[in-house]
Amino acid sequence: MNDPLIDAESLVKKRKKYELTETGFNEVPRKYRKFYRRWRGTGDQLADNEVLCPVCLVVIRSARELRPGDRVYCMPCMSRLTVVEKNGMLIATVVY
Amino acid sequence: MTDAIDPHALSEEDFHAEVHSFQFWLEAVEGYLAGTEFGFDAGQTDETFTLPELSDLITTLCNYCVAEKTALEASSGMIRFAPSPDAAIFLSTQVADEGRHLEVFVHRLKMLGIEDPWQEIDNRANRSLLQFKDRLLEFVDQQDWEAAIFVQNVLLEAMEFTVFKAHASSADPITSAILAGVVKDERRHMGFGENDLGRKLRQAPHTRTRLNQINKELNPLVLSTFSEIAKELKLNTHQGLSISSNYLATIDRLGFST
């Protein structure tokens, strides 16, 4: 007999992990730098582990795939954000 | 090599303590100011300007000085009535930033041949910006934290952030480098204001009505300043609308109408 809890858990897709490297972003102390990058404007695309900060327009990066409900921080502008899905895209909204 | 720390794993309390600290500021500005002199690489050579281009750039820089001096006077005054030690420490870093901004813009004016920058600033100051300054300093004198943080760190900083960012993308290389460094500082000031005020409005929603009145009073001054600067920067209608829409998005996120 199948355990329903184990079955439900296996339905939740495992999150992808990302090995982050520095991209030249220099606006936070070195120990945090690889978690942020500059938005390169039109044509730039966000990966599954990235969201754009709506306050200061810096790209926030995570070491794992982001999903709706995740909390991330934008250190360059000191904002706490929640990841939400809008029109099939992941965006970040500020939580005061 | 410094070990990386995942900022998203911090507790909210630890995150705020970290980003408001003087140590965080010191390590952040070291990243983009080390090796510069007055905000740019001293080895850079200046370009040649036509007389009208030079005059427009000088007027724009004079008004940046007005805005920065306003922020310097206001943020230093606000330390005395900051609502928490963390906010006071953060404001001390903002004071250092504003002093630096004023210095680099005045230095740039001198590079462009202005012998008495302070006189030139007085001569070319935008009237709307001066009215805005007077109103902000009244709130500071009254020790009105909500009004002062709204007018300075939301309205003024969002205006500076959007204008400087737009100007950096089209300016001569030296002015552009100076502005790019200033924009990085403005991110912190603007974010601090929006987040501090956002939390205050959540805890005391009744303050929204009063701030909305202040917003309606000062918005025409901000938009008039935008319009003057857009003319000096020779922005087309689309670019002009784009910078004011960035500013309006900040006001909108806090739930204020314009």
Image: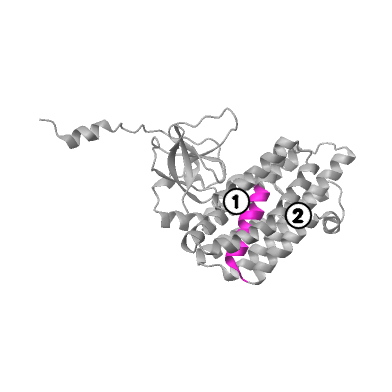
Disc 1 residue type (three-letter): Ile
Q: Which mark is residue B65?
A: 2
Q: Which residue is mark 1?
A: B251
Q: Residue at the spot x=64%, y=43% of the render?
A: B245
Element under label 1? Answer: helix
Foreground of the two, B198 or A37: B198
- Residue B255: x %, y % from top left: 55, 52
Front residue of this view, candidates B113 and A67 = A67
Q: Left or right of A70: which side holds A22?
A: right
Q: Position of residue B149 (x, y in %)?
A: 60, 61
x and y, in percent, of residue B148 in the image: 62, 63
Label disc, if present, on residue B97 of the rendered structure: none
What secondary structure is the stretch in magenta mostly built from? helix
Magenta residues, as a range?
B143-161
Q: Is residue B96 visible?
A: no
Q: Is residue B146 magenta?
A: yes
Q: Residues within 10 Å of mark 2 (few under 14, many from 20)?
A: many
- The structure's colour scheme is one colour
Residue drawn where x is 85% and y is 55% of the image: B120
In the image, residue A54 above or below residue A11 = below
